[in-house]
Amino acid sequence: MTSATATSSLAGEPFFRAASAAGNDWGPTVKACLDRLGPVEGCNLGILYITDGLAEHATSIVTLLRGVTGIRDWTGTVGIGVCANGDVLFDEPGLAIMVARLPEDGFRPFPPVKAGLEPLRDAAGGWLDKHGAALALVHADPRVQGLAGLVASLSETTGAFLVGGTSASRAEYPQFTTPGGSSGPVEEGGVSGVLFAPSVAVATARTQGCLPIGPKRTITASDDNVVLEIDGRPALDVFKEDIGPDLAADLRQVAGLISAGLPIAGSDTQDYLVRDLVAIDPRAGWLSIAEPVTTGQPILFTRRDRDSATADLRRMLDGLKKRVKTPPKGAVYVSCIARGPSLFGEANAELTMIRETFGEVPLVGFFASGEISHNRLYGYTGVLTLFL
């Protein structure tokens, strides 16, 4: 499978091309993708996503791309699936590429930031002081301890609205980055990406894949990630009440269907983070979720299904369409690996809806193990960013 789309562009205006290709042999696959991509003269930024079937060849792939295209700066990572334009390669060896021509001072890549922000300051501190950053496309290693805090710190330090996701792989977790010092074009660990100046016009929005099925409640007793009581009652009793009698009669049905939602304090959009249920103890009456909680914290329960996810994606796209005054020149879409074909039935269902709304815009993206929007890590969501 291959795909390619390009925008028409006046000299000096931002310009994007995107393409994808599948294949077990990385060399011919890269060549096929470049053939579909077409001319890249003048482009100065590359975005590369590969599926984990090609992860072991990450360094060879990006080295070849840098040599053939002449584009030095690349960003990206590995996913269980990747996409370009209207095509998705899910759980098969393949790659997706976007090349962009942007003002030289309109963006600045940075290498992985781990425990501290020194690599960011070394790579982009002077640029940030001069231009500032409105947006950052970022990629993160999900194995990093304290990743949520690192994402929040990165957003606060740069002043940028973050978009992106965490790598998804059954093997290696490469991130593509600009070589600097002793580092090469591929690294693992931390958060890397590209900062975009306010002069690069963008618009972004996020869609939830899990929607509330009950009211917002309060955790009244907890221990780390174990919810003992909700609204003064055993947590499991409240859980059964909210999910309904059919599911409550056989709790084995809730796996992969029902999750916990943790409302975000101060959100004016009633936003919440979705976290998986880890365990249920029917005798003790407690629930364990994939996130530490505190007594007094709000909680709700959500259901994951195709109809609600489709409705919310269309709502998000309609809202974004109203905000955008000009046709987008390029797009990046990061979706959760639990969405895609496992949720919508068809791998390219989300891309089809995006193209119905915005036309055949050049688009690249990947299926992540977690999605990043603003300053938080999400799950089961889709994050769309448009370059205008």
Image (cartoon, rainbow, N blue to C red):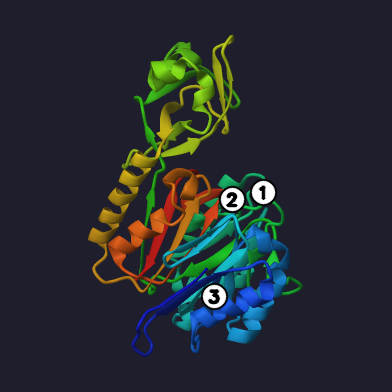
Nearer the observer: mark 2 or 3; the answer is 3
Identify which residue is drawn at 67% across, 80% down. 64
Give the structural element (helix, strand or loop) at label 2.
helix
Residue 161 visible here: no
Q: Is residue 88 above or below residue 122?
A: above
Q: CA distance from mark 1 to mark 3?
A: 25 Å
Query: Residue lying furthest right in this view?
Result: 182
x and y percent of residue 133 in the render? 45, 67
Identify which residue is drawn at 46% across, 23% down. 296
Do the CB atoms of the residues marked 2 and 1 lie less than 8 Å apart? Answer: yes
Q: Is residue 117 above or below residue 33?
A: above
Going by the image, does 330 lie left or right of 369? left
The image quarter containing residue 182 is bottom right
Query: Which amino acid type is shown beneath numbered disc 2?
Result: Leu
Nearer the observer: mark 1 or 3; the answer is 3
Identify which residue is drawn at 67% across, 64% down. 54
Residue 140 visible here: yes
Quadrant of image for the C terminus = bottom left
Front in this rendered view, residue 34 or 324: 34
**Residue where numbered disc 1 is placed:** 144
x and y percent of residue 304 in the render? 43, 36
Front in this rendered view, residue 270 or 210: 210
Image mark for residue 46: 3
**Residue where numbered disc 2 is placed:** 150
Query: Which amino acid type is shown beneath numbered disc 1?
Result: Val
Give the structural element (helix, strand or loop) at label 3.
strand
Give the structural element (helix, strand or loop) at label 1.
loop
Going by the image, does 24 lie left or right of 283? right
Query: Which amino acid type is shown beneath numbered disc 3?
Result: Gly
x and y percent of residue 234 in the render? 49, 11
Query: Residue lying furthest front in this view?
Result: 1
